[in-house]
Image (spheres, coloured by chain):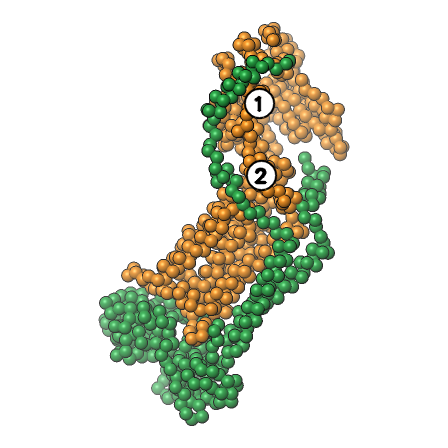
Chain colours: A green, B orange
Amino acid sequence: MSSNTASSSAGSGDSSAARKNSKRPKYSKFTQQELPACKPILTPGWVISTFLIVSVIFIPLGVISLFASQDVVEIVDRYDNDCIPAPARTNKVAFIQGAAPKSCNRTLTVTKRMKQPIYVYYQLENFYQNHRRYVKSRSDSQLRSPKFENQISACKPEDDAGGKPIVPCGLIAWSLFNDTYTLSRNNTPLAVNKKGIAWKSDKEHKFGNKVFPKNFQKGNLTGGATLNPDIPLSEQEDLIVWMRTAALPTFRKLYGKIETDLENGDTIQVTLQNNYNTYSFSGKKKLVLSTTSWLGGKNDFLGIAYLTVGGICFFLALAFTIMYLVKPRRLGDPSYLSWNRNPGGGR
Amino acid sequence: MIILCCSNIIFFLSLDQIIIGDQVEIARVIKEEVKKELRKSLEEAQLYMHTVAGPKLALVIDGKCLMYALDPSLRVTLLSLSLNCTSVVCCRVSPLQKAQVTSLVRKGAKKITLSIGDGANDVSMIQAAHVGIGISGMEGMQAVMASDFAIAQFRFLTDLLLVHGRWSYLRICKVVMYFFYKNLTFTLTQFWFTFRTGFSGQRFYDDWFQSLYNVFFTALPVIVLGLFEKDVSASLSKRYPELYREGIRNSFFKWRVVAVWATSAVYQSLVCYLFVTTSSFGAINSSGKIFGLWDVSTLVFTCLVIAVNVRILLMSNSITRWHYITVGGSILAWLVFAFVYCGITTPRDRNENVYFVIYVLMSTFYFYFALLLVPIVSLLGDFIFQGVERWFFPYDYQIVQEIHRHESDASKADHLEIENELTPQEARSYAISQLPRELSKHTGFAFDSPGYESFFASQLGVYAPQKAWDVARRASMRSRPTVPKKK
């Protein structure tokens, strides 16, 4: 049974013919799934070093954020209950809807030096500006240009008054906050600058400078403030601020800013008009004076979150190091393969 | 010739007797014989099953015997005997019997069956099994047309099962789990929001953001994952065929795995929602301005898109440049879309909710701080879980990855060696196959050249050695085969 040279030469002649007729598809790394790839293996080294890097980055950021937040001085004063005179407290709704004088005097004490500008906010609680029917009750096209004055379909029920369209229409505008605050310090009035409180993009693009309020709050129910019909909407900054609907039921909105420093120990007298009815839904009203930092107002969450996560990562790095030392496993130890661990469990 | 190994036992079942008599009587007698043989073999097999280091069992049964053994009354015995054996060889079977045997195993043993064949006689068998594979080639294309998968040579079966089948299982599991995870995370953030809207049904995200989430911002990376994911390379898959067990045990799609992904989705949605809504209360920059609903929701959406896309990189075992391109590209697509969408107003907009929102967001330091914090905290949970799981409860493929972690990709070595020269053996085989053939194609030899090759070969002066089974077949037929003239 020896091989035959004749047959092998015949074979090689035919094999070149075989290759010419080959149906093999064109080779490409993509279709043959041989793209160069990074094959990361999450070894203990990687896990521990990732935790350490995260904690090294996060802890300083947390410290920075927390310092920024701690630098902010904030005074919060809840006045909705106290500003109802004692005899009327049994029926607050009747009081607020009645004609009685609603002015109220509050005193705030400054406990730490506040550098200007100091921002004045009103804070509402349990007020669902994010309710679906409320959020959709507006007409942005109407706000932008007088040409679209009649696009009021989404604004029901506050869309027209006596057949004529309301500008600005909708529940959001109708419920405009109307408490006012007059501040004074040591009997000298503190000027509250009400310009520049809205986002520039809103003022320049969303609220037109040729649109004027019309037929506003002319219905049976007054929801909130009235608007001066001679001032165009782009300059009605209270309205603009109010119409940027808040995300959660507890929110603050910018009222104005004070451009003088307040010293430690100053007493601020606030004369406020308690007009806004939050009593029918057990809402709360608070007056807030706050400075800001480069990161914003007094919100420790970011700083605390960074510090906590950085700390947790550091602790985890230590814990994993200890775990890997106590229960080591050699990388690539074949005895961990399931068929080596249960030798009989094959077949 | 079948070679007996002293540690293996082979059961032969074939009918050699010639019985003269009434047909019905003959059939009954034969059936009794077959029944006795089967029972005897089964008892013997069961004896060996109970010994731990027992010999391997094999069953050889021929078509005539199988005709009786597939009778409904004897089928069960045949099946239990076959399941006790390591391998069963059925020879001289007709196509119908092939299909019957396959159905017997499929329905009786309730296992997943695979059948492979190349001729028209294999079609019914291919269709009777769960997975039918046809080999295209010498015997024609009938088997290929009836099959679920077609391959060109029998030896490609190892690649089909151990490499591509395994990868396919892994990829499908990962893609399905990821899809559920990313949608669950996205939807749950809106769910947490409903608690704070007085359950009025206000949507958290802008309509277009929501609609395009699955279309543009998270679609491509998972496609790339499904195309390119490999746990170990092709050559390692073949070197460790036991890795196939992971598919048999369904290790990547158990309820436990689903629960882990669902928990991760709940955790990530909570982090994205709570961290942003809590930290965005109050003044947001040094000018004391306040965010509205759409600012907050756009920030949550951005953190979500980043977290969900980077998750792909955490779950991939092999990261190609397409992964980077699609993950980075999806996040970039989101930002570009936000820039464009928030920058324009059309008369068709009913409400310009998100007008200019992204620019407002990006003008604050808070945005960047939140963007660094939230995705990293979201992914931290999964990272910790993966680290612990790999160390203390590793999967088999992870151990194999670690064993071979220092070997670089031997890309060409993975190839089936198609581009090699034909060996002299193969060259001769090819030459023989070009010889004039018998008209009938039903020779019963599915995977090799016809048995008469030696005859024709000798006629044309090509040397072809005798095949062992050829000689045996001719001997068993008790006919006088033409003795080929050997050179």
| Residue lying at 54% horizontally and 18% vertically, measured from the top left | A11
Q: Nearer the viewer, residue B166 or B401?
A: B401
**Rendering coords of residue A109 (x, y %):** 50, 87
State the image quarter where residue B380 is shown.
bottom right
| Residue lying at 58% horizontally and 26% vertically, measured from the top left | B101
| Residue lying at 37% horizontally and 68% vertically, measured from the top left | A134
Circle 2 packing at 10 Å, graded few (<14), some (14-19), many (20+), is few
The answer to whether residue A235 is left or right of residue B204 is left
Task: State whether residue A39 is above or below residue B480.
Answer: below
Pinpoint the chain carrying mark 2.
B
Pinpoint the chain carrying mark 1.
B
Task: State whether residue B305 is above or below residue B143.
Answer: below
Can you see residue B302?
A: yes
What's the amino acid at mark 1? Thr
Dot 2 and dot 1 within a common chain: yes
Task: State whether residue A68 is above or below residue B208.
Answer: below
Return the residue at label 1.
B423
State the image quarter where residue B130 is shown.
top right
Return the residue at label 2.
B410
